[in-house]
Structures are given as C-alpha cells and as structure tokens.
Amino acid sequence: MSSIREDALYIANEAINAVLPENAVISALRSAEFEGGVILIAIGKAAWRMASAAKEALGDKIMKGVVITKYHHSLGEIEGIEVYEAGHPVPDENTLKATERALEVTRNLSEKDTVLFLVSGGGSALFESLREGVTLGDLANITKQLLNSGANIVEINAVRKHLSRVKGGGFASLVQPARVFSLVLSDVLGDRLDSIASGPAYPDSSTSEEALNIVRKYGISISERVKEVLALETPKALNNVETKIIGSVSKVCEVAARKAESLGYRAKILTSTLDCEAREAGTFLAAIAREICEFNSPFEKPCAVVLGGETVVHVKGSGKGGRNQELALSAARGIKGLDNTVILSVGTDGTDGPTDAAGGIVDGTTVERLMEKGMNIDDFLDNNDTYHALRAIDDLIITGPTGTNVNDLILMLIR
Ligand SMILES: Nc1ncnc2c1ncn2[C@@H]1O[C@H](COP(=O)(O)OP(=O)(O)O)[C@@H](O)[C@H]1O
Ligand SMILES: O=C(O)[C@@H](CO)OP(=O)(O)O
Ligand SMILES: [Mg+2]
C-alpha cells in the first residue's frame, strides 16, 4: 500500500498533468475558421506549450509568430515562430524587446487577418510596452512594491494596466482592424478576463480612479510623473476580439477529487476560490483536520479535502518562500502530532514565489522533525523563510516549470 504522502503527490501530479494546455488548444482550434493570414502571439508561463500546440493544429496557416515566456520556460524551437524569454514577476529589458517584436509582426494587418493570441498567467510581466512618461525602472519598482504589499492580482493589474500601451485592451486596439482570436488559460480567480495577464485583448473594467486608490491603499510610492500617467484611461470597448477560456483551477480541483476517489478517499472540493492570507488558510485547514481526526466529522475518513485558489502573503520578513510554502508550514503547526494526515499546497506553474520549489507537503511530524534539527517553526514563519524550513526536512515539492499555470492546488488527505 502506498503511503499517504505518496498518494498526495500522485494526486497533485495527475491534476497538474490534466491542465497542460496542449489538448485544450488543439480542440479549440479544430472548429476555428480563418479567412486571411494568421499571426500567432503567445504570452505567459504556458506560452511555449500553447504555441507549439497551435502550430501542430494549424501548421503553415500560421504566417509568423512570437512567443514570450519566462526564463527557463521555453522547450526549444518552434518552426516559423520566434521564441523569447524575459523577466517574471518583475519585467526586464527583454520583456520590452520581445514585446516590440510582437508589435512589429502584428503591424499593418488587414481586417481579414487574425491575430491568434494565446494568453496565460505571467503575461503581465512578460508583455509590456510602456506609456510615455513611464520608464522600465519605474515599472520594476512599482511591481516589486505591489507584489509584496498583500494586494491581490486584480488590484495589482489595475495599476499595471494604466501604465501600459498593451495591457487593458491596448494590444487589441493596436492591431486593429485585424481580428483577435484569443485562447486563455486562466490563473485569476473567477476567470476575470481583463485581469488574466492584464487583459491585453479584453475591454478593461478597471478605472484610473481605482488604480490611484490601490496605490494609496497599499502605500505604494510613485512619482508625480507616474501619477499623471495613471490618470489616463484604458479602452472600455473593443469590437475585434473573440475570447475562449481553455482551462482554469476548477478543472485541477475536479481531477484531484476524482483521482483521490480512485485511491479510496471520500473527496470534497471545499472551494476553488481561496484567496485569503496564506498562513491563515493553513491555520484554518489544520483546524478542520483536527476536527476530522477527533470526531470523524464534517468529513468521514478516509477523506480528501481539495481547495483551489491563490492566497496572498504580506511579506514582512527577509527570508525566502512563497504562498504555497507558507500555507503548508502554517498548516504544519496546526496538525502537529496528528497521525495519517498530510497537507500539500502547490503552484500549478511549478514555481512558488522566488524559489525553485513548487510548494510544500507537511504532516503531523513536520514540527517535530524541525525541532530535531534545532529549528523553531515560528521563527521561520515570522521571517517569511518557509523555503529554508521545508528544505531542511525534505518537505518541499520540486517539479520545475510545468508549462501550465492555473493557480494553486491545496490538498489534505486523512485516513
Ligand atoms: N519570502 C516569501 N515568503 C512568502 N511569499 C513570498 C516571499 N517572497 C515573495 N513572496 C510572494 O510570492 C509572490 C510571487 O509568487 P509567484 O509564485 O511567482 O506568483 P505567481 O505564480 O502568481 O506568478 C509574490 O506576490 C509574493 O507575495
Ligand atoms: O500575468 C499576470 O498578471 C498574472 C495573472 O494572470 O499571472 P502571474 O501571477 O503568474 O504573474
Ligand atoms: Mg507561481
């Protein structure tokens, strides 16, 4: 019989494999019709896999193409398509250069032409052409502040959209009169199309006023010059765009639940929209675990509790970690001493925060194993240093870039 840890890792792996984008791209393109030329632009952490699937489906119908993905996320050449890598989560020079190339290949198109736009999370950092008055230095600085402020992705992107020529519908405006056919892998809760990769081809629902309020709410420091740029509006209507969502965290949760059932666990999806502070989610989940272990309620053992979403972290310490590692370690504190209980939290993109881990997997012995090494769990949580704690006791999950990106999966198994 496999161990409960092995079960958890198997379930997570199967669920992530089920949202690799290839099949979804190919089936979405099967029924699509293109009158004139097709120009492919793919952005985000899943861009390479999405583009290579589109090439497989459409072959020479694709006249030109540009892929922009995160460093170490491309898997080689794709015939007839230019592949670039750039900075994420903070954009860099290569972001601007690659985006300029994407704008060049989509210039001067006719209304018969189609821009096949393949969008996945990460696109905000990877696809950028700045409004006049904003420098790359400004954007990098504002991005770093926002990422560590506890602001959620919808808020972060409301600000980024108002600094950009391509975000918030800007890209679709620039390629007019060509039509944009957009396939989107969602990594934003509620599948908000104007927030995923900051919606370069979707009418923006956020306003300048909101962007300025977010800057104020989180105490983001910006110059007067940047403030003036933020006050300019984004497109609120576009008539050349068609959009399809081809994957999201709900599917990850459903597959995880199904796989858990196939291993004999009674599975429940608790939520697919978890969005609170990471350590609070971990503490809360641990409390549910204790209830189940003691009273066999509200879920009967053996059970699998599945959650999907994207928590946030107010980073105050100077350590290394990510939201999944922080959720897992805080859960470990709460399930200390429980038998046959495992909690796992993993980013489906394979990278959790600025680390080489995808997440963490903890159990009732995690705290004790840390203590044996002379490590106090609270110190590591306080310093946002969850990576070093989990690494010391082999409780990290390391997958490398997965080629997909649909938020995070959290799984609790009890038997
Ligand atoms: N030391 C840390 N501990 C916990 N979280 C952190 C730490 N450093 C950065 N983060 C969080 O990691 C987030 C970025 O993680 P990442 O996995 O790259 O996000 P995404 O998958 O959404 O692109 C930041 O928003 C920040 O809140
Ligand atoms: O690109 C982005 O804006 C976000 C959401 O889509 O993705 P990530 O959090 O992976 O950077
Ligand atoms: Mg991630």
Image (spheres, rainbow, N blue to C red):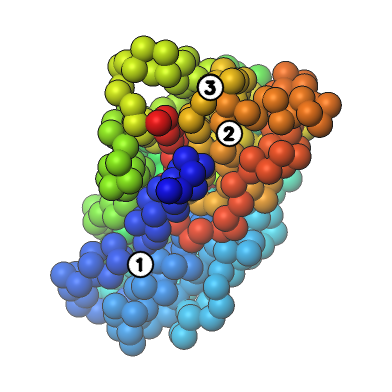
Q: Is mark 3 within 8 Å of ligand 1?
A: no
Residue 13 position within the rendered picture, expressed as x and y whole percent measured from the top left: 45, 53
Residue 378 position within the rendered picture, expressed as x and y whole percent measured from the top left: 72, 18
Check disc 1 and report its element: helix, strand or loop.
Answer: helix
The residue tagged 3 is: 338
Residue 33 against residue 166 in the figure, above or below: below
Regarding residue 371, the answer to whether it shows in the image is yes
- Tag 2: Cα neighbours inside 10 Å, few (<14), some, or many (≥20)? many
Residue 340 position within the rendered picture, expressed as x and y whole percent measured from the top left: 48, 30
Q: Could you say which is closer to the camera, residue 402 or residue 137?
A: 402
- Based on the displayed image, in which of its 4 quarters is residue 92 positioned? bottom right
Regarding residue 250, the answer to whether it shows in the image is no
Q: Could you say which is closer to the camera, residue 86 or residue 240?
A: 86
The residue tagged 2 is: 362
Q: Could you say which is closer to the camera, residue 406 or residue 264?
A: 264
Query: Which labelled disc corresponds to residue 22?
Result: 1
